[in-house]
């Protein structure tokens, strides 16, 4: 009797549980699709283009229209929905230290057509700036400081630092000996120093690093080359090898570069050759090299990797990569003043450009860094001293900030005595918010580089 009663009770409990499970399942479906998980890299999405946000839901869904998806603050994106997943792809890096809110309206169940609204919030990583400060008579310093921070940290110091590059929080540091020859070392985040064997005795020229490519690249000129102008381009991947490998172009010959840049989000490089030819090269496939003209200078590659800026005798141009038609970047300026356009870089909505504007009062030209949308220009920075100069600028990956290297007074400036990558001893770097023109900081140094690693 007890056993029969137990079985009867057990069956009743199972039936009740089954009814409850069915009821909850029906209720869950009736409420429409729900978010079950999300995946995004808050560091990579602020550094590299073509990053994704993957949203998984609890049931198969109908196709999602882009018009049904919103993100605040606004950012370009594409959307792809399949089965139980919605993927947002961001073609360019998002802003640092920013909270983004994603909303998908009318997310519809594929089974019964019930709709729901999906919401998800994420925050991108904060930013740090690394820059080089040279100090006469004492070791030079590579310094890290957070955007808007008041404290800074010396991450590496050495005698006669020529240049450096940041790769995932580690450093590639170039130093000079008394003869002017370069040495290259990799400095890990823990301070471990690994010397890199160079192709010979000589000088490193332009050095860059790229997190997406996981590589460091530099030009190198051997001391034994007559005239010293080969400037062959080499790449190395610290995770796999410390042996620099020459980048080759069409015909398998090493590429000699006056200037070069990584294409953000890929391992491709844009090169201005020693003969003035500009090209897009794939380091692993020389036959894929794409020439796109001859120019005086290579100014920049846009944060989304889609365009390069170059200059010819008439000024700056933008070129759609891999080899699109050049578009002239004609500077605009309020008041119709005479303007000479210098180095430029495309960013969303327009471009940044160094403009030399004629000053009728002094009879000379004053330099400005301006944001230009093709019809109007907005000044972001003008040296306080009319005798100051804007030497170069660098845009953060998401085009949120710009660092501006300046010489405060060209007439009184003295060189720092470095044979390679020399600067005025008085060089400073101004950090400016692109959207507002707000001056965030003035750094006593140069070669500012953006990173999310090791933020103070």
Image (spheres, rainbow, N blue to C red):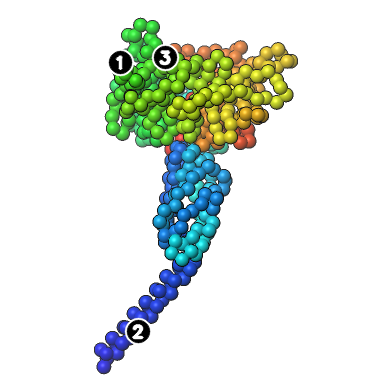
Q: Which mark is residue 133?
A: none
Could you tell me residue 451's position as x and y percent? 46, 35
* Front residue of 353 and 211: 353
Q: Marks 2 and 3, how far apart in space?
A: 86 Å
Residue at the disc numbered 1: 200
Q: Secondary structure at mark 2?
A: helix
* Neighbours of disc 2 within 10 Å: few (<14), some (14-19), many (20+): few
Q: Which mark is residue 274?
A: 3
Residue at left offset 44%, top offset 45%: 52
Could you tell me residue 29's position as x and y percent? 45, 67
Q: Is the C-beta separation of discs 1 and 3 under 8 Å?
A: no
Residue at the disc numbered 2: 12
Q: Is the C-beta separation of discs 2 and 3 under 8 Å?
A: no
Residue at left offset 61%, top offset 16%: 409
Report whether residue 136 is seen: no
Please tell me whether residue 267 is drawn above or below residue 312 in the rendered image: below
Outermost residue to the top: 226
Q: Secondary structure at mark 3?
A: loop
Could you tell me residue 186's position as x and y percent? 35, 28
| N-terminal-most mark, 1 or 2 | 2
* Neighbours of disc 3 within 10 Å: few (<14), some (14-19), many (20+): some
């Amino acid at each position: 009797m007890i056993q029969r009663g137990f079985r009867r009770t057990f069956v009743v409990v199972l039936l009740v549980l089954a009814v409850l499970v069915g009821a909850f399942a029906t209720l869950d479906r009736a409420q429409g699709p729900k978010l079950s998980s999300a995946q995004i890299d808050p560091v990579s999405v602020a550094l590299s283009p073509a990053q994704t946000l993957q949203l998984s839901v609890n049931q198969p869904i109908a196709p999602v229209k882009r018009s049904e998806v919103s993100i605040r603050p606004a950012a370009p994106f594409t959307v792809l929905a399949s089965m139980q997943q919605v993927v947002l792809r961001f073609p360019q890096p998002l802003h640092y230290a920013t909270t983004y809110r994603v909303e998908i309206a009318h997310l519809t169940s594929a089974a019964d057509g019930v709709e729901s609204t999906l919401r998800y919030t994420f925050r991108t990583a904060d930013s740090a700036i690394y820059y080089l400060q040279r100090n006469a008579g004492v070791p030079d310093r590579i310094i890290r400081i957070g955007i808007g921070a008041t404290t800074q940290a010396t991450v590496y110091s050495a005698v006669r630092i020529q240049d450096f590059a940041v790769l995932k929080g580690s450093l590639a540091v170039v130093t000079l000996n008394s003869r002017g020859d370069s040495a290259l070392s990799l400095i890990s985040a823990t301070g471990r120093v690994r010397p890199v064997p160079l192709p010979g005795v000589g000088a490193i020229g332009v050095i860059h690093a790229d997190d997406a490519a996981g590589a460091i690249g530099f030009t190198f000129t051997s001391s034994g080359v007559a005239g010293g102008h080969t400037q062959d381009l080499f790449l190395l991947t610290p995770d796999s090898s410390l042996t620099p490998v020459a980048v080759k172009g069409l015909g398998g010959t090493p590429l000699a570069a006056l200037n070069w840049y990584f294409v953000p989000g890929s391992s491709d490089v844009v090169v201005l050759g020693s003969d003035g030819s500009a090209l897009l090269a794939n380091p692993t496939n020389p036959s894929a090299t794409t020439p796109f003209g001859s120019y005086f200078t290579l100014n920049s590659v846009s944060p989304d990797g889609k365009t390069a800026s170059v200059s010819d005798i008439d000024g700056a141009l933008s070129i759609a990569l891999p080899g699109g038609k050049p578009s002239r970047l004609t500077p605009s300026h309020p008041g119709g003043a005479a303007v000479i356009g210098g180095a430029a870089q495309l960013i969303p909505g327009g471009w940044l450009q160094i403009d030399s504007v004629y000053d009728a009062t002094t009879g000379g030209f004053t330099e400005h860094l301006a944001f230009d949308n093709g019809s109007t220009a907005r000044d972001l920075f003008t040296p306080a001293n009319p005798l100051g100069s804007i030497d170069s600028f660098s845009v953060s990956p998401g085009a949120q900030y710009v660092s501006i290297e300046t010489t405060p007074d060209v007439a009184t400036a003295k060189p720092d005595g470095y044979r390679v990558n020399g600067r005025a001893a008085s060089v400073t770097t101004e950090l400016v918010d692109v959207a507002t023109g707000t001056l965030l900081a003035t750094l006593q140094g140069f070669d500012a580089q953006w990173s999310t690693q090791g933020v103070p």
